[in-house]
């Protein structure tokens, strides 16, 4: 992102009456870490977000795939709205609500497949969230992890349709969730409730692409991909430091 674009975003932010800021957590505000529980929000990023939250006429959401207690641990000190588990849960003004109704019978069918892959792929592990299951391979040898993940997706494809599930092929994680869940549908719901004349949406992973796609036809939406790789986002930032710099300019 060049200086002209940054200046344009800042100007549009200033003149807007109803702003929406959607920030992914891991890989966007915090670098990915080998142990997810150590991905603490850096102090300078925390300070910037606290300033942004204080901004009137601005609604800010952290929008993440993490489970609710997991993300709460990192953000407990900030009165911020959170969308967790890829849209399945939302925290508004301090109160958590489920956004979907689920029956959990599908987990019984999926867990043995995840166990089978975990056995074949040392250092990988399964995370059970309330509405989803995730298989993480960040700590696995890169080639082995990748080939195990392809095998897992192949196995899952034979099962998911009978349970109305979908697979998210993320950054070192394969996640299984219901079809109604996703950052795209979460953002759509927000727009059905209120109109916004400025949107900033930042993320780094496959799940954020659904957000970016949703905003393709929104003129006042600035979508930003962090890092390399193909994207539907209009702009790109190289690192979380650049994210901090952009957010800092808006918060000032
Ligand atoms: Mg991310």
Image (spheres, rainbow, N blue to C red):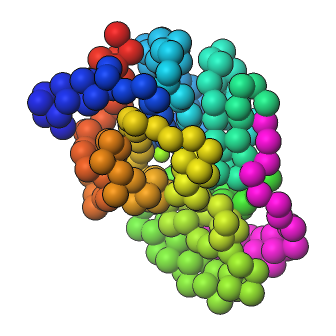
Residue 167 % position (x, y): 59, 71
Instruction: Name the residue: 87% across, 68% down.
Output: 103
User: Quarter of the image holding residue 92?
Assistant: top right
Depicted 147 relative to depicted 234: above or below = below
Q: Is residue 113 magenta?
A: yes
Q: Is 124 displayed left or right of 141 in the figure? A: right
- Tell me which corner region of the image, top left, top right, bottom left or bottom right, holds residue 94: top right
Q: Quadrant of the N terminus?
A: top left
Q: Is residue 199 above or below residue 89?
A: above
- Residue 48 position, x and y percent, is 44, 15
Camera-nearest residue between 130 and 185: 185
- Give the left or right position of residue 4, taking residue 221 as reference: left
Q: Is residue 56 visible?
A: yes
Q: Using the image as rendered, state which of residue 178 and residue 36 is in the foreground.
A: 178
- Identify the image quadrant of the C terminus: top left
* 115 horizontally vs 18: left or right: right
Q: Which residues are magenta?
A: 96-124
Residue at horizontal 38 percent and vertical 15 percent from the top: 251
Q: Position of residue 12 (x, y in %)?
A: 28, 29
Residue at 71%, 78% in the rendered image: 164
Seen at 26% across and 50% down, the residue is 234
Rendered view: 9 above or below 203: above
């Amino acid at each position: 992102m060049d200086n002209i674009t940054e200046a344009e975003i800042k100007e549009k932010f200033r003149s807007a009456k109803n702003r929406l800021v959607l920030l992914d957590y891991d890989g966007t505000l915090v670098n990915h870490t080998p142990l997810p529980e150590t991905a603490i929000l850096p102090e300078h990023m925390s300070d910037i977000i606290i300033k942004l939250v204080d901004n009137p006429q601005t609604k800010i959401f952290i929008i993440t795939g993490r489970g609710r207690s997991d993300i709460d641990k990192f953000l407990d000190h900030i009165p911020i709205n959170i969308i967790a588990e890829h849209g399945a849960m939302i925290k508004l003004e301090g109160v958590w609500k489920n956004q979907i109704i689920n029956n959990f019978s599908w987990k019984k069918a999926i867990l043995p497949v995840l166990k089978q892959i975990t056995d074949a792929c040392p250092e990988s592990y399964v995370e059970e969230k309330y509405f989803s299951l995730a298989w993480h391979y960040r700590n696995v040898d890169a080639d082995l992890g990748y080939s195990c993940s392809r095998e897992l997706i192949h196995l899952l494809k034979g099962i998911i349709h009978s349970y109305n599930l979908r697979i998210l092929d993320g950054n070192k994680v394969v996640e299984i969730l219901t079809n109604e869940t996703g950052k795209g549908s979460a953002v759509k719901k927000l727009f059905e409730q209120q109109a916004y004349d400025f949107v900033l949406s930042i993320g780094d992973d496959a799940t954020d692409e659904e957000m970016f796609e949703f905003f393709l036809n929104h003129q006042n939406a600035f979508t930003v991909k962090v890092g390399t790789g193909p994207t539907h986002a209009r702009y790109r930032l190289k690192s979380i430091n650049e994210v901090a710099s952009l957010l800092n300019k808006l918060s000032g």
